[in-house]
Image (spheres, helix red, strand yellow):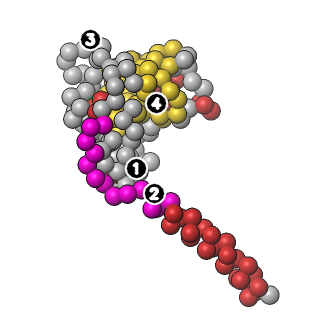
């Protein structure tokens, strides 16, 4: 009887193993990608991001720190992040329920991915704005609907010429 149970479980184990093998083949090791800048008025895709750590994401690129999800902070795709030039700049994000103002603290890497340093995640699309839960709250999106939404990203930084550390940071 035990042998029969083991034999019936074998096809399921092979199926699961095969599925995992196919999924791992979808993510290729890092290669530099050039020319990923989206057009100026590209519609952004807002995604939910945990800036407090623990999800496999590392500290923020701007200061090497984690940030509370209770403050409105974002990570921008590489072409919008511009090699740290947008660090601590304020941006506005427009959605269908209103707008939010957030501080740029990190990069969502659009050029590299699928490696240990990036937690084996594929590269970000070139139009991603990863927002903390405070950004989603400011946009009026209920908790059960947070995660992925199209919106407008105001490419021009607001009039904050000096780099300012986000509220809640030392």
- Relative placement, left or right, of 6 versus 16 is right
Which callout, 2 or 4, points to the residue nearer the camera?
2
Q: Disc 4 on helix, strand or loop?
A: strand
CA distance separating discs 1 and 3: 34 Å
Q: Earlier in the sequence, mark 2 or mark 3?
A: 2
* Numbered circle sitting on residue 122: 1
- Relative placement, left or right, of 59 versus 13 is left
Which callout, 2 or 3, points to the residue nearer the camera?
2
Which callout, 2 or 1, points to the residue nearer the camera?
2
Q: Earlier in the sequence, mark 4 or mark 3?
A: 4
Q: Residue furthest right?
A: 1
* Magenta span: 23-36
In percent of width and height, residue 97 lies at 55, 16
- Residue occupied by mark 4: 45
- The residue closer to the viewer here, 46 or 56, is 46
Q: Disc 2 on helix, strand or loop?
A: helix
State which quarter of the image contains the C terminus: top left
Q: Earlier in the sequence, mark 2 or mark 4?
A: 2
């Amino acid at each position: 009887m035990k042998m029969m149970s083991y034999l019936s479980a074998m096809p399921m184990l092979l199926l699961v193993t095969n599925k995992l093998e196919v999924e791992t083949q979808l993510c290729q090791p890092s290669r530099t990608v050039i020319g990923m800048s989206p057009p100026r008025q590209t519609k952004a895709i807002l995604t939910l991001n945990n800036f407090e750590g623990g999800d496999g994401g590392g500290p923020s690129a701007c200061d090497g720190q984690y940030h509370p999800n209770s403050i409105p902070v974002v990570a921008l795709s590489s072409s919008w992040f511009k090699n740290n030039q947008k660090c601590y700049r304020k941006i506005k994000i427009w959605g269908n329920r209103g707008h939010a103002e957030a501080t740029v603290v990190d990069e969502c890497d659009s050029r590299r991915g699928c490696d240990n340093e990036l937690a084996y995640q594929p590269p970000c699309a070139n139009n991603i704005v990863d927002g903390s839960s405070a950004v989603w709250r400011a946009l009026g999106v209920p908790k059960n609907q947070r995660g992925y939404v199209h919106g407008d990203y105001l490419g021009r930084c607001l009039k904050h010429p000096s780099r300012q550390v986000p509220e809640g940071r030392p």
